[in-house]
């Protein structure tokens, strides 16, 4: 149950999988994302409400062929340039996108976690999101006749989240901004949780979410594994690192150097003929 | 009372802050909206109930967060709820008075684009996307938009409707089943635009001190009409400026 991160990723994540790494600004599973890059996984459908710099890195490293998301940016700083480069110039590989609003994505996870085929919400009406995404439809309420939006359930092959701690039996505890992690784990076929630490006893914390061990497949200890995002009660968000990413992400060569630093090797994918420096 | 020199960004933020009333519930976007809401809370609206989409309800940060989910928001909130809860139980259920949004592009009818510049399938510029904005624009009782003026941002028709303002004119919000009033003001570094009560088209209702109407018209990508009774925004007070500068670190 509790295994090293490299082993957990090898066991649970495979080329071509639909993988959700969730954590809404807080507790982003960055260490797990970096392990996916190191293992050179390919052709992933990456799912995340708020792709931020770890998704920029996964996309720039060529791990993804498709991105399902609702807001892709560097919060408070600006754009994700590897994401932009993949969408507008197919570098290093083409990236298909499927895009929603936050409310739509949140409800898709709720449906997935609830064993329902779709979710309903008041949303999308009149927007071009509905025009470009065949997974957004309208449905008539059988009771009131109101027109509402319907979105398909989201059921990742594997969901990865980061939490503050787990006990030795594999029960997971997280608190602070708890985002969409519970729903994302319950919606998935397999779940990997990285934690700051493993403890004998999970002492209750106000506002906590506990994921019972029966819905978690593997736990890996990854202290600092959410940085440069943060782990409430352990360390703060490294806002400087988010600002610094802008210059690295903006430039293919700077990014490639960053990637070599992470993997200890040349970038696994050479720029395609479609690629050109921006 | 005043006399301290101020910038166009500062009067924009202060004007936006003044549009908030005490005890309102306010769904806050990051960046300029967050700065303005925090100025309001520290001046005339100490009871402003700020919500960020990370699920932090009634948060009272002692400094400006960089993201919508900084730790300071959770630490100081009345309660922290999950993302489905903030969108379903709070926003969708109609519990929020005002949504405070930024935008990359806005059009004559206050429709908002934060998705792409150019064609969706072959964009010139890929922007971050929707986030919480479509449902904030749909479901808050009213919406304020804060953005800098310019012809590339203020366009006849947005390239992509991420969030609906007033659609293509009168009656559209009702037809689309959108329950909030939509954008009731757009606050820029040059002045304030509001939808005409009849046509729903954005018209110029106020200019900041020293700004000529022609300057605003030139910075707008459609034939901007000027409301009868155009006003001039009151200058920022020393208090407003010192609060704003203490938040942004521009002291």
Image (cartoon, coloured by chain):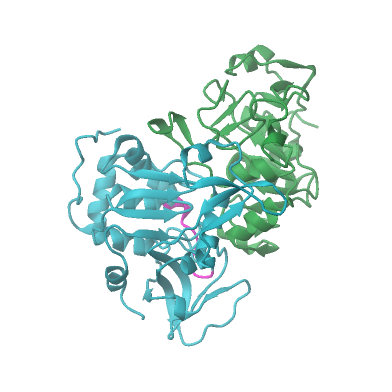
Chain colours: A cyan, B green
| Residue B227 in magenta stretch | no
Image quadrant holding the C terminus of chain A, namely: top left
- Which residue is depicted at the point 58% across and 33% down? B112
> Is residue A86 or residue A106 the one in the foreground?
A106
| Residue A238 in magenta stretch | yes
Q: Is residue A33 left or right of residue B152?
A: left
Q: Is residue B185 left or right of residue A244?
A: right
- Which residue is depicted at the point 75% across and 26% down? B233
Q: Position of residue A155 (x, y in %)?
A: 44, 61
Q: Position of residue B133 (x, y in %)?
A: 59, 43
Q: Position of residue A181 (x, y in %)?
A: 50, 65
Q: Which residues are magenta?
A: A233-241
Q: Residue furthest top?
A: B214
Q: Is residue B70 left or right of residue A8?
A: right
- Which residue is depicted at the point 78% across and 48% down? B24
Q: Is residue B223 visible?
A: yes
Quadrant of the rendered image containing residue A110: bottom right
Q: Residue furthest bottom?
A: A200
Residue B215 higher or lower than A117, as above or below? above
> Is residue B71 or residue A130 the one in the foreground?
A130
The chief SS type of the magenta part is: loop
């Amino acid at each position: 149950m509790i295994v090293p991160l490299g082993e957990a990723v090898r066991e649970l994540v495979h080329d071509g999988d639909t993988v959700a790494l969730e954590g809404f600004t807080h507790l982003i599973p960055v260490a797990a994302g970096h392990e996916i890059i190191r293992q050179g996984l390919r052709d992933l459908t990456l799912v995340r409400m708020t792709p931020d710099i770890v998704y920029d890195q996964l996309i720039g490293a060529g791990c993804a062929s498709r991105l399902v998301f609702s807001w892709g940016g560097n919060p408070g700083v600006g754009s994700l340039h590897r994401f932009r480069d993949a969408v507008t110039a197919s570098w290093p590989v083409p990236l298909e996108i499927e895009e929603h609003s936050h409310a739509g994505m949140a409800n898709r996870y709720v449906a997935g976690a609830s064993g329902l085929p779709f979710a309903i919400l008041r949303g999308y009406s009149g927007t071009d999101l509905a025009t470009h995404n065949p997974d957004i439809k309208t449905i008539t309420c059988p009771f009131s006749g109101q027109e509402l939006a319907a979105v398909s359930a989201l059921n990742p092959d594997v969901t990865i989240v980061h939490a503050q701690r787990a006990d030795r039996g594999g029960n997971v505890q997280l608190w602070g901004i708890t985002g969409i992690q519970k729903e994302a784990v319950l919606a998935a076929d397999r779940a990997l949780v990285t934690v700051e630490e493993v403890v004998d006893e999970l002492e209750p914390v106000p506002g906590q979410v506990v994921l019972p061990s029966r819905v978690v497949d593997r736990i890996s200890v990854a202290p600092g594994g959410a940085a440069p995002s943060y782990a409430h009660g352990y360390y703060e968000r490294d806002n400087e690192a988010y600002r610094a990413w802008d210059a690295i992400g903006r430039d293919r060569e700077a990014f490639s150097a960053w990637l070599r630093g992470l993997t200890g090797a040349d970038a696994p994918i050479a720029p395609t003929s479609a690629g050109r420096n921006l | 009372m005043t006399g301290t020199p101020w910038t166009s960004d500062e009067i924009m933020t202060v004007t936006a802050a003044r549009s908030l009333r005490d005890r309102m519930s306010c769904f806050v976007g990051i960046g300029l909206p967050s700065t303005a809401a925090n100025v309001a809370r520290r001046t005339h609206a100490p009871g402003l109930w700020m919500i960020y989409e990370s699920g932090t309800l009634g948060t009272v940060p002692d400094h400006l967060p960089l993201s919508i989910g900084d730790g300071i928001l959770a630490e100081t909130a009345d309660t922290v709820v999950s993302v489905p809860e903030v969108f379903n139980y709070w926003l969708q259920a109609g519990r929020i008075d005002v949504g405070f949004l930024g935008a990359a592009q806005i059009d004559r009818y206050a429709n908002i684009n934060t998705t792409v510049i150019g064609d969706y399938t072959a964009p010139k510029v890929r922007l971050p996307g929707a986030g919480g904005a479509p449902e904030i624009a749909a479901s808050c009782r009213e919406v304020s938009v804060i953005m800098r003026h310019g012809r590339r941002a203020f366009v006849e028709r947005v390239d992509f409707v991420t969030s609906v303002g007033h659609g293509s004119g009168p009656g559209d919000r009702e037809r689309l089943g959108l329950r909030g009033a939509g954008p009731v003001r757009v606050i820029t570094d040059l002045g304030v635009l509001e939808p005409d009560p009849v046509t729903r088209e954005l018209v110029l209702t106020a200019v900041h001190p020293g700004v000529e109407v022609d300057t605003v018209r030139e910075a707008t990508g459609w034939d901007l009409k000027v409301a009868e009774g155009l006003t001039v925004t009151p200058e920022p007070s020393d208090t407003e400026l010192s609060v704003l500068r203490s938040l942004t670190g521009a002291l």
